[in-house]
Amino acid sequence: GNSVTQMEGPVTLSEEAFLTINCTYTATGYPSLFWYVQYPGEGLQLLLKATKADDKGSNKGFEATYRKETTSFHLEKGSVQVSDSAVYFCALDTEQAGTALIFGKGTTLSVSS
Amino acid sequence: GAVVSQHPSWVICKSGTSVKIECRSLDFQATTMFWYRQFPKQSLMLMATSNEGSKATYEQGVEKDKFLINHASLTLSTLTVTSAHPEDSSFYICSARRHSQETQYFGPGTRLLVL
């Protein structure tokens, strides 16, 4: 079946450090891949997405590349800020009619100044 | 564009009462809406898939008589937690999509606390 596996957190970094959050997936066909961010007490916000192999999604300094050969979609940011502290969810969408997103378990990022 | 709202954002109720949560797509028509539940520090768990004009499809283990879902129009779906108990306290999040080839857009969530 379809699934998403994220690295377990929490991830604790100092401001301006480099961030990587690993995400791998299992899916039939050609899913779209997403990263969502959830700030404390809030709902989910779409951070970035990629819809086909080798696509790179980017937003707010975050990047992730859809790697079909390694079935991965790792999230990276070159220099994190305290305001990036949140929970990050990797998700896939098979885009079949009526199907929901499949989420990873989430990775908590804590950035200190 | 593609804004999804939820109402209320916060609700506190007594055990045994019913609570209705609304999910609206504000600037698009959503053929499909999804309801998720999130426990503290955990991922989202899909509860049900709702298509306009038809009965919702519930995930295994989700009681359909407990969590009533109505998708009466292309812009509104409601989740009613009937006879709520403290264990129903959670963060409920809806999402909506225009059609199967599009991204899902999430509402801001509704935090339910049952006393």
Image (spheres, rainbow, N blue to C red):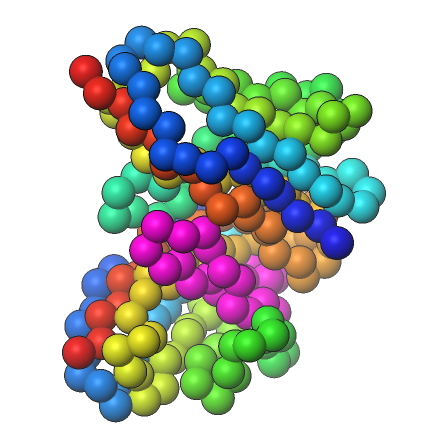
Locate residue B27, reporting x and y percent. Answer: 45, 50
Instruction: Give residue B38's quadrant in the image.
Output: bottom left
Task: Give me the residue at 67% from left, 39% from top.
Answer: A25
Q: Is residue B3 visible?
A: yes
Q: Is residue B21 above or below residue A52?
A: below
How many numbered marks appear? 0
Whether residue B44 is in magenta: the answer is yes
Left or right of B59 on screen, residue A113: left
Left or right of B79 on screen, residue B52: right
Locate residue A11, reporting x and y percent. Answer: 37, 28
Q: Is residue A26 above or below residue A63?
A: below
Q: On the rendered image, what quadrant is the C terminus of chain B found in?
A: bottom left
Locate residue A27, reporting x and y percent. Answer: 75, 44
- Judging depth in this view, the residue of B24 and A106 nearest the camera is A106
Whether residue B33 is in magenta: the answer is yes
- Judging depth in this view, the residue of B79 and B31 nearest the camera is B79
Q: Is residue B20 visible?
A: no
Q: Which residues are magenta?
A: B29-51
